[in-house]
Amino acid sequence: MTQFEEKLLRLRKKAMALPLSPGVYIIKNNSNEIIYIGKAKALKNRVSQYFGAQHNLAQKVRQMVFYAENFDYIITDSEFEALVLENSLIKQHKPKYNILLKDDKGYSYVKITKEPWRRISVVFQKDKEEGTADYIGPYNSHFAVNQAFLQAVGIFRLPTCTRKFPKDFKKERPCLNYYIKRCSGVCRGNVPLAEYNESVDGALDFLRGGSGSSLQSLTEQMAEASENLEFEKAAKIRDRINAIKSLKQKQKVVSNKVLEQDIISSVTDGKTTVFQVFRIKGGRLYDSEYFTFLYKNDNDFASTQSSENTTEANSEKSTELSEFIVQYYSIRTDIPKNVTIDRPLEDAPLLEDWLTKARGSRVYITSPQKGEQAHLVAMCQSNALEQLAQLKNSNVTEFGVLTQLQKLLGLQKIPEYIESYDISHTAGDENVAGMVVFKNGKPYKNAYRKFKIKTLAGQDDYGSMAEVLERRFNEYLNNAEGFSTLPDLILLDGGKGQVGAVVPVLNSLGIDVPLFGMVKDDKHRTRALTTAEQTVGIQNNRAIFTFISKIQDEVHRFAIGYHKQRRSKSAFKSSLTNIEGIGTERAKELLRHFKTIKNISNADLSELENAPKMNRNAAHSVYSYFHQEDNDADIDFKKED
């Protein structure tokens, strides 16, 4: 028994002696440092889970358990008291494996320079040198300020480039913004200073008072210009009014019947979790922020746990979400009336009570399943998915289909690394297999592998597939180069027969990886994915159907290509390399010189002798092979010494 296993037994024995009471548990490492603090409705049930079967725990939790040496606990009168105490202790000790947030958003300002050609920008802090600029602010939400700024400069067609005016007049051609009518092209030198500053003032009015007051002011200006017969000026103001009205129409798309709420959603791949928060006031989105938590293996942990499959149970996802909610609102003073989340939480009533106490009035936590609220949650989750996809150097389309596949197949984690296998032969001859890999939704050709079936003769697709998977994962267990990655999903070209042949092999090797067969329809397209027990249709989900079909086509192409290569080599051997004295190199040179087998068979003895890498002995063997009906005595031949 290893030291790690002995430690698990010791800690589990201690955990099983805990009471079934609410409280807080404090896990420490061998230096007596606190590495994790958690709350529990029943201490015995919760703490004992950490020191049981490790493959059922999330990556972060398994890593924490690896370094756990001991734990303390504090019994409370209620679960609510445990929640409050947990939050207080986390703030004090900042344990390594707790989700820790800090309020580092700061404030944002709108900066207006004091030069003749004033420039507007959004900054996080004021300049140290006073008197160089004016500022509007501070604002709590950088997102809201930046969105308003982009709208203002677009409506009033102000430059956002780094050119200096009037120093850079006519030095370069206008940028793209000028040609798409988002900038008046001040750099051309054709915009009067007075007109430019009028646009700056209009943008500042828009930022200070919003679209409503800007519309009223601009309407008055347009009427005055028309009264003074300044029709060109009136037309420009009219265009600005239309731009603001158009913007208001777009903003109505995100209007919401719930006037005040936060929407929280998360996605994870088992190692990285992204939490996305939408903040809504007055029925409109006014802020958006995301938090990324990356759980990295330490080297010794990674080596010890290399044969385990990383999984994450739904209970761990819920625990993470609960922990995030507590930490997020611990650093916020503006707690909304409604908090909408992407999954039901067992301790939602407890969190509601805690948030209600912090807000001073009733707070509701909901997880909608349909309607407008569910749509908003889906939008929030797609933003979290976008952030996770960027971290994986993928795009949201590719990563999105992986999350859909995860949900459809009930996988514990997103299948970032997929291996697919296919067998190819001709009536049992030249029996081979191909393995292709899709990483983050894209072919990863560096990991493609070819297998020649060694233990079977004739046509046996089930046995061939079992042999290939056994060889592949024996290589993994032996840490062989090129086979060191454990896939998140295995797809076999075939149905329940192939799956049934492979499952015992994986079980015998202790490999715990989801395994499905790709079942084809009459047109040789994958219509479903199957295990030994159930079949999951994919034809109604276009994204998954297209993705699986792409994998199936790729593995089929790769296996067929290897089979044809083997057959070609075999045919090549039977015609030339079976000739005495002709090896692979001489055969290649003969084909390179004569181009075809027919030309070689028609060549006379002298032509064969003069060919590259040939001698008289080899030339006679080739000539005799293709002229067996000729009389050898008629050929003037003498063996070389």
Image (spheres, rainbow, N blue to C red):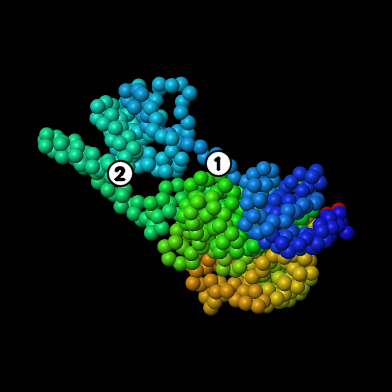
Q: Crowding at label 2, few (<14), some or many (≥20) Cα neighbours within 10 Å?
A: some
The quadrant where residue 153 appears: top left
Residue found 56% across the figure and 68% down from its top: 408
Question: Could you say which is closer to the camera, residue 496 or residue 593?
Answer: 496
Q: Considering the image in quadrants, where does the N terminus appear? A: bottom right
- The label shown at residue 139 is none
Residue that mark 1 sits on: 103
Residue type, label 2: Ser
x, y percent for residue 609: 73, 54
Q: Is residue 505 above or below residue 482?
A: below
x, y percent for residue 446: 65, 53
x, y percent for residue 205: 30, 36
Residue found 31% across the figure and 48% down from its top: 247
Q: Of helix, strand and loop, which one carries label 1?
A: loop
The quadrant where residue 3 appears: bottom right
Residue type, label 1: Asp
Residue that mark 2 sits on: 211
The answer to whether one can see residue 308 in this image is no
Q: Residue furthest right?
A: 1
Question: Could you say which is closer to the camera, residue 103 or residue 316?
Answer: 103
The answer to whether one can see residue 116 in this image is yes
